């Protein structure tokens, strides 16, 4: 009955999807609003004879994941915002070591300890990273509980396929809400890890996985290679969703659970005579720069709607290369922007643009 | 003619000696290699490496290694062991990695009783960065960050690592050894072997703290450095076995 719909909370959906994906080890430390993931898996992993550790810190948790995945198994940790900040060093190492770490961030409010209100303030932390050096992480942003499942599957697959860390960037709203969803079967093939996984140097040369390169030329080449790999990831794996794009003059651009009432806002605005469409990156990294630039070339203006102070906003501005207007509708955290708020903000922006056009 | 001495089989064939003259890392790594040979476990090993002079372990040993950030070797090793309980997992760190930046990871690995073996080189200083005050720097010891000597008011006390690890219920073996004399070197090898054996026997965490010299940063000849180990370090960090759990549970 794998296709049966169940009513399930986002955090539990992510946890069970990890089990289905073949996650052999989970390591984590509690923090609201993602604690249910670790709670659920504590019993589940023991029952299945898989690995589980209540880690002493997030630092330890993600380093346990690095150790586990270096042996070729799938493993993950989950956390939230200020505690994901503690994992940034490890993400830099994991990217350089090409270790398939999977990290779930169920975002809360920052900066600092902040609070447990939902927010989207970790876009920069996830996409640009807080670790040192030139590295890139794959970032997937679900908007529904169903997508929490689908993208958890995809996170494990992409991590091993490209030997690159993957962040599933959810938020407190998704983590805590219940919604009907179905698990289905894990839809991806198993990736062959035998060429690099550490299993003991039996009948082959010893292997070392490390980021330290004492020779300058090797270090330079390593960074070029990592970025070449990410070019391939960008080419193959960039995904997004569009609604009513073709005739749209204005494209509302959103990610994650902010998508949930953007379609309603779009419909209200369309009824009011504004040709509005919606564009939603599913991969925040690689970001769909190319597609946004194509749409900008066709004269479509952008309005970015997000629950932070304008983080994805900058990427959209960068992508349109100054060809069209890009505006921001936002709130830093807390209650999600309502349909009414989005509609009135968009109307104000449109009116402002009209007045500006008339004045020049 | 009978050959009585050779390079351990677990050493890489083409390694270059990169430590300073007189450094005890060379002896310690050789002892680890001999123990690996004697236990016949080379092909089953996955080691999590540390940061500091000890990182060069993977230049010398012909084994699978995964890098861990500074202080996180025991967390990484825990991940390896939980993923592959059938493999032999050990770490080789300095006192800074194991007992300063990584103290939480080290203690909790011992408390969980992970079947992992750990070697910690205690040379009372941060060697790779040029001799700064570390967690085991002796009272009165001059370093580049304690120019007038370690005093309690400014710097607090050095940590007795092996005794702390012995207090953890998950620890199966904890000992402190030194490399300043031939008998001590022989004892050190036996301690490493026991710390490895408790893992093979599934008894818990195996630990050896090795008092080592750092002639370069101590500004001493190798001979004087070993004299310092004997006369200044051992009185503060006594040699001995602080915990040993045997197979029959005692």
Image (tube, rainbow, N blue to C red):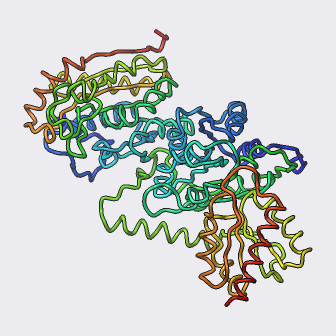
Q: Where is residue B84 in the image (x, y as percent from the top left)?
A: 55, 38
Q: Furthest residue to the front?
A: A359
Identify the residue at the far bottom of this view. A360
Residue B5 appears at what percent x and percent y?
Answer: 19, 36
**Residue pictured at 59% horizontal, 32% vertical:** A54
Visible residue check, residue B64 = no
Q: How many labels does the image show?
A: 0
In the rendered image of this protein, does residue A292 appear above or below residue A102? below
Left-right relation of A350 to B123: right
Q: Which residue is drawn at 33% across and 42% down?
A: B10
Q: Is residue A114 above or below residue B168?
A: below
Front residue of B129/A224: it is B129
Q: Can residue B100 be seen in this view?
A: yes
Quarter of the figure with residue A27: top right
Q: Relative to B32, say whether B193 is above or below.
A: above
Query: Residue A80's x, y, as percent?
Result: 62, 45
Residue at x 28%, y 25% (from the top left corner): B156
Image quarter in which the C terminus of chain A is found: bottom right
Q: Which of B74 and B65 is in front in this view?
A: B74
How far across and down, in percent of the image, does residue A233 sit? 60, 68
Residue at image coords 70%, 48%: A118
């Amino acid at each position: 009955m794998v296709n049966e719909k169940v009513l399930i909370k986002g955090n539990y959906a992510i946890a069970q999807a990890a089990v289905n994906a073949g996650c052999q080890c989970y390591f984590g430390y509690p923090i609201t609003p993602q604690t249910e993931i670790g709670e659920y898996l504590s019993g589940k992993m023991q029952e299945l004879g898989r690995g589980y550790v209540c880690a002493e810190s997030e630092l330890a948790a993600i380093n346990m994941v690095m150790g586990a995945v270096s042996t070729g198994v799938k493993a993950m940790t989950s956390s939230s915002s200020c505690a994901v900040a503690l994992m940034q060093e490890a993400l830099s190492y994991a990217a350089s070591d090409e270790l398939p770490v999977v990290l779930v961030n169920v975002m809360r409010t920052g900066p600092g300890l902040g609070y447990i209100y939902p927010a989207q303030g970790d876009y920069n932390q996830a996409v640009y990273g807080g670790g040192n050096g030139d590295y890139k992480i794959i970032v997937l942003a679900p908007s529904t509980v169903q997508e929490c499942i689908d993208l958890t599957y995809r996170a494990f697959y992409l991590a091993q396929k490209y030997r690159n860390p993957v962040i599933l960037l959810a938020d407190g709203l998704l983590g805590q809400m219940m919604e009907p969803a179905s698990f289905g079967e894990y839809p991806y093939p198993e990736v062959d890890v035998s060429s690099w996984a550490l299993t003991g140097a039996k009948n082959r040369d010893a292997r070392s996985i490390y980021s330290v390169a004492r020779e300058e030329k090797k270090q330079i080449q390593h960074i070029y290679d990592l970025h070449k790999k990410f070019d391939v990831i960008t080419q193959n794996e960039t995904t997004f969703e569009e609604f009513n794009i073709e005739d749209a003059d204005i494209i509302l651009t959103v990610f994650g659970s902010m998508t949930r009432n953007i379609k309603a806002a779009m419909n209200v605005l369309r009824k009011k005579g504004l040709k509005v469409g919606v564009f939603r990156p599913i991969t925040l990294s690689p970001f769909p720069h190319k597609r946004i630039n194509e749409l900008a070339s066709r004269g479509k203006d952008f309005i970015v709607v997000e629950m932070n102070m304008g983080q994805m906003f900058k990427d959209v501005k960068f992508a349109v290369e100054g060809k069209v207007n890009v505006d921001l509708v936002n709130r830093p955290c807390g209650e999600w922007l309502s349909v009414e708020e989005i509609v009135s903000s968009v109307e104000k922006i449109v009116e402002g643009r009209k007045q500006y056009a008339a004045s020049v | 003619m009978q050959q009585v001495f050779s390079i351990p089989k677990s050493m890489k064939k083409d390694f270059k000696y990169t430590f300073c003259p007189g450094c005890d890392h060379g002896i310690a790594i050789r002892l680890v290699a001999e123990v690996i040979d004697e236990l016949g476990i080379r092909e089953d090993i996955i080691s999590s490496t540390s940061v500091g002079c000890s990182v060069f372990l993977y230049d010398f040993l012909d084994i699978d290694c995964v890098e861990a950030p500074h202080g996180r070797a025991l967390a990484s090793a825990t991940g390896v062991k939980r993923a592959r309980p059938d493999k032999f997992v050990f770490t080789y760190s300095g006192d800074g990695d194991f007992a300063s930046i990584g103290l939480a990871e080290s203690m909790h690995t011992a408390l969980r009783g992970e079947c992992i073996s750990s070697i910690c080189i205690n040379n009372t200083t941060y060697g790779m960065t040029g001799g700064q005050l570390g967690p085991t720097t002796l009272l009165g010891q001059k370093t580049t960050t304690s120019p007038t000597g370690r005093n309690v008011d400014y710097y607090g006390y050095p940590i007795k690592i092996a005794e702390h690890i012995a207090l953890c219920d998950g620890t199966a073996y904890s000992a402190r050894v030194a490399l300043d004399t031939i008998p001590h070197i022989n004892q050190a090898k036996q301690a490493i072997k026991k710390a490895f054996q408790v893992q093979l026997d599934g008894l818990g965490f195996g630990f050896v703290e090795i008092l080592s010299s750092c002639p370069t940063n101590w500004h001493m000849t190798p001979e004087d450095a070993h004299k310092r180990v004997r006369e200044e370090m051992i009185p503060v960090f006594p040699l001995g076995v602080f915990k040993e759990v045997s197979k029959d549970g005692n």
